[in-house]
Amino acid sequence: MCGIVGYIGPKSIESVLLVGLQKLEYRGYDSAGMAVMNSGEMVTRKAVGKIAELEKQLKNQPLIGNTGIAHTRWATHGEPSMINAHPHLNSQRNIAVVHNGIFENYAKLKAELIDDGFVFLSETDTEVAPHLMEKYIEEGFAPDEAFVRMLKRVEGQYALAAITEKEERKIYFARKGSPLIVARGNNEFLIASDIPAVVPIAHEAIYLDDNQWGYITEKGISIFDLSGGEVTPQWEPVSVSVEDVEKGDFEYLMLKEIYEQPDVFERVFKQRVDDAFIHFPELKFGKEYLARVGRILIQACGTSLNAGMIGRMYLEQYAHISAETDYSSEWRYRNPLASGDSLVVGISQSGETADTLAGVREAKAKFMRVLSFLNNINSTMARESDAMIHLMAGQEIGVASTKAFTAQVLNLLFFSLYVGSIKWLLPAEERREVLNEILALPEKMRSILKNHDRIKQIAEFLKDKNDTIFLGRTYNYPSALEGALKLKEISYIHASGYAGGEFKHGPLALVSDNVPVVIIAPQGDIRGKMISNLKEAQSRKGTIISIITEGDEEIKKESDYYIEIPPCMESISPLLVAIPLQLLAYYTAIARGCDVDRPRNLAKSVTVE
Ligand code: AGP
């Protein structure tokens, strides 16, 4: 949500800022802008809509300089418009600020500044920042001090960058609650909301902590805490490559990420499995502690919660631990009860989701221990959790989560097998049997991906529908939720997932000849019950799209469309079922002409509540 890029160095400022913004497009935005020190003068360009609009403007009115900041805005306070687009300037137009987050006390600050005679142009909370800086500079403070004074006045969360005409070769930055990194290339420095924006240039980066501020100049970087103490920069190599953040030969990043899943699994196997034993080298909890955990409370949002719901079943089945799941946004406010043997598990691709992070903080405030399953190991959640498990999915950029979802389920499965073994409650033979099934997954995934043409045909049928129902049971009930979430977020077709057993208790009323029903019925204990669901839908003229195990002639005959997955153990079938569901959503969205990597109204990482 919102993206920030800042650059100081010898390269073309326009190109660096534009490429940086493009690499942050996945975060979601509805307007874009930049401010550059152009021969000692502050110059801005803004555009509503896509970055391409900003690029057009720059073609007509280029910017020259070596210090600049840029922003993609995802509207919170005020509609997407030229006036509300960042950067925001002070009245004298010599200070520019870009901001990600929310200043919760902006209304009070704005009223105070208006009383002081400052004139506001936008509806945004951000605009208080340049006016506050101007106020302190007018009072005689140097820009550094004015920046810090401004930081001390604003409440809420932010990642910020500012430039001033007074210090034209300096970019100020600060972080509290929203991610921000500083990076360096060859005699050049950058700041950005996330690593993809700096990948083409930088070889090292610093992941800032909350309440740190500082500035970059052509010569280097200075970081301070809010009380003025200097912080020693901790540089880390940038491990993400240009190929990781580009779509290569694929039409969309989402498709590339879907196809990467077998490779992600093989990468995870290399780290986790060795001679039928499972390893978690990064896990800071000892075996004695894990063996004593009596209850696990999983809190997450969206796709990560769907993965958590499958994980809950693994924890019960293989680790013999009672587990429950909840939306982070509910969990954090419902005063959850927990005893000393409870462990809170947060699941997040980004590690920056505001609600999940707040859930982590809530747990810690209640003296509960927190384990997080994270793809971004430099994230705020990674720092604030007591222990972490790395998903190892690689950089995920597509707004619709795909490879992170299957990596979440896989790592939850490994974790459950690991804890079950520690507790001596999972027989070695059973563990081996499940492991053998897991190790066979990449090849099975590849065979599903090869058969994508069949799914394309179904997408052609689905593309003209307004509603779709997804049904699954036990391990595949969360698959139904995830299939529905994928379809609605990128194709904008209304879709809902239900537990098959609940179908007759209400959702059945929705079925008609215009409402397709996706029946997830791989081989296993619940297949028979799913056939009953199929019949219920069929008798109401619903078109049946089934996901079945290869060669299931009985269900094939009953279905209007079917997608086959290779045979596998029922408990791990969600890891195969996920792929046709992702492809179905993808091809349906493509058939409807949707921009799948930039779905309307959505942001990759939801960093505000
Ligand atoms: C998934 O396709 C979504 N875009 C969304 O539900 C996402 O999973 C959710 O916002 C949680 O994100 P996180 O994993 O980064 O915490």
Image: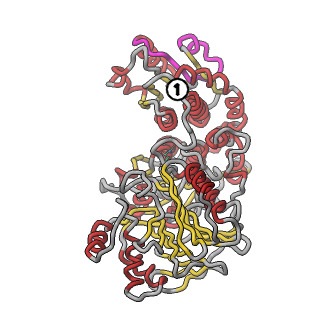
Q: Identify whether 67 is placed above or below 327.
A: below
- Please give left or right for residue 193 compared with residue 298 in the image: right
Amino acid found under the numbered disc labelled 1? Ile
Q: Is residue 420 inside the magenta stretch? A: no
Q: From the image, which quarter does the C terminus lie in?
A: bottom left
Q: Which residues are magenta?
A: 540-559
**Residue placed at 47% from the left, 86% from the top?**
142
Residue highlighted by disc 1: 520
Of residue 350 and residue 420, the one placed in the foreground of this image is 350
Which quadrant holds residue 572?
A: top right
- Please give left or right for residue 533 compared with residue 334 in the image: right
From the Cβ of disc 1, is ligand 1 less than 8 Å away?
no
Q: Is residue 554 inside the magenta stretch? A: yes
**Residue placed at 37% from the left, 27% from the top?**
502
Q: How many marks?
A: 1
Q: Residues within 10 Å of mark 1 (few under 14, many from 20)?
A: many
The spot of residue 393 in percent (x, y) is: 63, 50
In this rendering, does residue 436 appear at all? no
**Residue placed at 45% from the left, 57% from the top?**
85
Of residue 53 and residue 534, the one placed in the foreground of this image is 53
Determine whether the residue tagged by mark 1 lies in a helix, strand or loop. Answer: strand
